[in-house]
Image (cartoon, coloured by chain):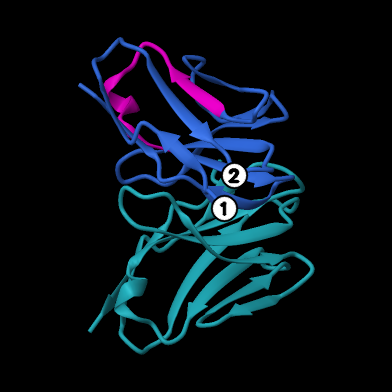
Chain colours: A blue, B cyan
Amino acid sequence: EAGVTQSPTHLIKTRGQQATLRCSPISGHTSVYWYQQALGLGLQFLLWYDEGEERNRGNFPPRFSGRQFPNYSSELNVNALELEDSALYLCASSERGYGYTFGSGTRLTVV
Amino acid sequence: DQQVKQNSPSLSVQEGRISILNCDYTNSMFDYFLWYKKYPAEGPTFLISISSIKDKNEDGRFTVFLNKSAKHLSLHIVPSQPGDSAVYFCAASGTASKLTFGTGTRLQVTL
């Protein structure tokens, strides 16, 4: 069984640009979660999608947004990138809120 | 408001000894608790979980204890091995809700 896949593995963007990160959940999982891990910090909850709808979002500005597609894959978009957005972005999927499995993450570097 | 707290940022234990990692939570609605292990630049890997209806769950060298009245859980690793060196995150969730993570404890197992 394929795990949670994230792409790209690494992404380098210039301040002010937009970044798009992608996540494919485990087959059968309808929920996708996005987390940010900035250097030296813990995992901060960003967004939760389930059945195509945003169910909850963390304490992040509106320039962090996303969506979930009918096949349950998800995109995270970060607009107007700032240097402090540099972090490891992790996606996880679950079935009905249990059995979370994480992907390997996308390392976003803003220069 | 940090609802899940890991007050020890780091822990050093000798190989073969017991490692005890602690976690406190404040939200009484949490009913499911998990421990994840994380290596740098990788996604967290699930270790062990416990439901609020239990006070102990064991899986090989890993045991998680839950004290609901104290809103405290701990992860015991016996015996500790050098390969256990990683950052350990505890996480909690309510029914079908997002995972809230602690800030992590870096475990170093020395020879």
The mark tally for this picture is 2
Tell me which residue sits at (66%, 71%) in the image: B66
Q: Earlier in the sequence, mark 1 or mark 2?
A: 1
Q: Would you say B29 lies left or right of A106 here? A: right
The chain under label 1 reads A
Q: Quadrant of residue A111?
A: top left
Which residue bears the numbered disc 1?
Answer: A1
Residue type of the residue flagged with mark 2? Ile
Q: What residue span does the magenta drawing correspond to?
A: A74-90
Which residue bears the numbered disc 2?
Answer: A26
B3 up-or-down from A81: above or below: below
- What is the secondary structure assignment of the residue under circle 2? loop
Disc 1 vs disc 2: Cβ atoms closer than 8 Å? yes
Q: Residue furthest front?
A: A1
**Mark 1 → mark 2, Cα distance in angstroms:** 8 Å
Image location of residue A21, percent across then percent down: 43, 26
The chain under label 2 reads A
Residue type of the residue flagged with mark 1? Glu
